[in-house]
Amino acid sequence: MALKIRLARGGAKKRPFYRIVVAEATAPRDGKFVEKIGTYNPLLDQGNAERLVINTERAQYWLSVGAQPTDRVVGFFAHAGLVKEAKKAEQTKKSQPRAKAQQRLKEQAEAAEAARQAAAEPAAAE
């Protein structure tokens, strides 16, 4: 029985609310789960204590038993100090400008830096 610690969505349309649950890997996202170990309400402000509530004792137990958290839950656990922050994969290069455009941007940056230095030299001489 492979266990996952994941989010189960609740709430109304466009008003999400998530439970952090331990469930079998084959169970549906919002279906049967073994235990609820916390909640996450993304609509609340970042500083609000009710935004993320985790029962740390139960989370540590399930991690020790071998339950695998999802990427989002690893971030929550890292924020709570239960696990190390996961290393994020580097983005693909598809979104970057092509080689000629990168070269133009580099030349513009160099020209702007030279102009700044030229403007700073007369002010330093006075």
Image (cartoon, rainbow, N blue to C red):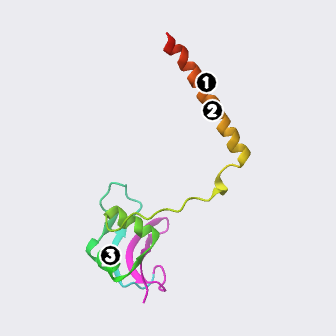
Residue under numbered circle 1: 115
Could you classify mark 1 by the number of other residues whose Cα lies within 10 Å: few (under 14), some (14-19), or many (20 or more)?
A: few
Residue occupying the far right of the picture: 100
| SS assignment at label 1 | helix
Which of discs 3 and 2 lies nearer the camera? The answer is: 2
Residue 60 placement (x, y as % from top left): 30, 75
The answer for how far apart the CA atoms under marks 3 and 2 are is 54 Å
Residue occupying the far left of the picture: 57
Callout 1 amino acid: Ala
Residue under numbered circle 3: 37
Residue name at image x 54 percent, y 14 percent: 122
In this rendering, is residue 1 above or below 29?
below
| SS assignment at label 2 | helix
Comes first in the chain, label 2 or label 1: 2
Left or right relative to 44: residue 125: right
Which residue range is magenta in the image? 1-30
The answer for how far apart the CA atoms under marks 2 and 1 are is 9 Å
Comes first in the chain, label 3 or label 2: 3
Residue occupying the far top of the picture: 126
Residue 16 placement (x, y as % from top left): 45, 67
What's the magenta bit mostly, secondary-structure-wise?
A: strand
Q: Was residue 29 drawn as part of the magenta stretch in this picture? A: yes
Residue 75 placement (x, y as % from top left): 41, 64
Residue under numbered circle 2: 110
Callout 2 amino acid: Glu
Residue name at image x 49 percent, y 64 percent: 14
The answer for how far apart the CA atoms under marks 1 and 3 are is 58 Å
